[in-house]
Amino acid sequence: MIVFACGIMHESHSFNNRLTPLENFRNATPGCIAADPELINTRSVEGGILSAARDFSWDLRFPFSAHATPSGPLSADAMDTLVARMTEQLREAGPVDGVLLSLHGAMFAVNEPDCEGAILSAVRSVVGPNLPVAIALDPHANFTDRMADLADIATSFRTTPHVDQWETTYRAGCLLNDAMAGRTRPQLYVGRLPMLAGLDMGRTLDPDSPMNRLKRLAREIEQTEAGVLNIDINAGFYYGDVAEAGPSVVVTGHGEDSRFQDIADRLIAEAWKTRDYVSIAFTPLEQAIARARQPATKTGPLILVDYTDGPAGGAHGDGTTLLKLLLDADIDNSVVGPIFDPISVEQAVAAGVGQTIALDIGGRTDPAYGGGPVSLECRVECISDGNYLRKGPYAQGTVGAFGPSVSLRRGNVTIILVSKRLQPEDREQYRIFGIDPEGVNVLACKGINHFRADFEPIARELVFVDTGGLVTVDFKVFPFRNVRRPIWPLDAVELPT
Ligand SMILES: [Zn+2]
C-alpha cells in the first residue's frame, strides 16, 4: 500500500491579533521527516505514523509535519503556502492507496476559519472522493461538518495533557489500513450540541473527570455495538471563532447507519450535563505570593501557574505581572520562566556570562495582556543554545528548541528568557540552564495543561493565577463572529427534553 502522510498542526487563538507567519512553523520543509531517522522512536504524532507504516509495510510518502506554538490566526501566506506545499507533495507521490493527516482541528487563518476543512478539500481535489482519508487530531479540535464530509476516519488524543500522541496517529493508521484493504467502509458521524465549552477542557488527570467518564462509555460502546470502528471525543477550542466551535463526539462507523449518529448524539448529551464543570480555580495574586512565601513542609517546588499567559493556549507568553511580584517578594530559590524575549536574550548573550547588565524584560508583544517590560539589573548566569530532549511523558524523545536562551539572576530570583515561544512541558527545559526543577523552592511558569504531565509529580503544590493574559477563562469578552448562535454560555440555551 502506498500511503501519503502529512502534518499541519496549529491551534490558533482567533482573538490574538499577532498573526502566525510561515516562519513560525517547524518541520515544514519537504524531506524533514526522512532526514530524522530517530523520529520513529519518539512518542510523537510522527512516531505513530512511522510505526504504523513499518508495522503494515506501507510504502510511506511523508514529506513534512509542520507545527507551530499556538498563537494568532495564520497569515494568508502561511495558510496558502502550507496547503500548496502539501498538495504539490501529494501530486508528486503519484497514485496512493490512502492518506493519513496529522492535524490540530482548531487552526484558523485570516482567509479561512476552517483550515482543516480546507486542507481536506485540497487533498480531495487530488485524490478524488473515494480514497480512504484518515485524520488524527488534537481533542481541542472544533470538528466541522466539512471535515466530517471530506474525511473517512478521525481520531483524537484521549489525554490532556496530551501524552498519547503516538497512540492517536497509530490508531488512525490501523483504521486506515483496514479501509485500504477493503475490510471496512468508514464514515464519520458527529454529535454536537449548542455549547462552546465543556468537558473541563478535556482534562484527564482526574480519573473521574467528565472526559474520562465519557471515554469509558465510548470504550464500552466500541466493544458492544457492531460496526463502531472508533469513537473520539473533542473538548473543542473556545478561542476558535468557527461556526462549529465547541465539544463534539466523532464516531467512525462501518458504512451508513443511523445508529452511529444516535451514538454520537447520546454521548454528546452526556457532555452537556457537565458543561459548566471546571476543575481549575484561580488564586488571587497576592494570596498566591503569600502562599509561596510560606516555608515548605514538603519537598518539590510550589508551582505558580501563570495560566492565562500560557503559550499552549495561544497567549503571548511574555507577560510580566508574576515576574514583578516575584522580584519584589525575592523568595529564596525561586525561578521564573521561560519568558519569551529574544531582544533581551541577544543583549545578555552579547554581555556574556558573569556580567551584570540592565535589561527591559518581557511585556513587548502587548502590555495590555499581562504587563509591560520590567527594567532591572541582573547577572547573566548561563547561556544556552536552547535545545532540549523531551524525557517526560509529553512527546517523549523529541527535541524542543527555545533558540538562544539565557538564565539571569537578581537577588534570590532566577529568570529564564528564550527566543522562541514554547510552553513549559518538560523538566529538561530547566536542566539545560543547570537548574534541577525538583530542587527549586518556587517555580513560576506559563503552563496550562501539558506541563502537568512532567511537573505535577514533583510539585508540592500547584497554584493557578490569572495575570490578565489572552487565555482568559472569561471568553465572553471576545467578539465572536462565526460561531453558531445561540450557544451556551454566550447565550441562554434550553434543550428540548
Ligand atoms: Zn490540545
Image (spheres, rainbow, N blue to C red):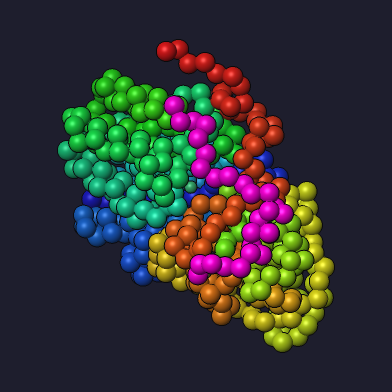
Residue shown at 55%/18% (left/top)?
A: 493
Which SS does the magenta portion mostly show? loop
Tell which residue pokes out farthest to the top in this image: 496
Q: Residue, x 69% and y 34% (percent of image)?
A: 477
Residue closest to the eye, 239 or 76: 239
Out of 394 and 411, give the one closest to the viewer.
Answer: 411
Q: Nearer the viewer, residue 495 or 228?
A: 495
- Specify whether 297 is left or right of 490: left
| Viewer-nearest residue: 425 or 341 | 425
Image quarter where the C terminus lies is top left
Residue 192, percent from left and from top:
44, 26
Q: Is 180 located above or below residue 192 in the figure? A: below
Q: How far across and how far down the image is residue 338, in percent?
A: 62, 65
- Whether 415 is drawn above or below 497: the answer is below
From the viewer's perspective, tell me whether residue 61 is left or right of residue 343: left
Task: Answer whether residue 94 is visible to the viewer in this image.
Answer: no
Residue name at image x 81 percent, y 71 percent: 376
Q: Which region is colored magenta?
A: 273-299
- So how many labels did they put on this image? 0
Q: Quadrant of residue 382?
A: bottom right
Quick check: is 228 in the magenta stretch? no
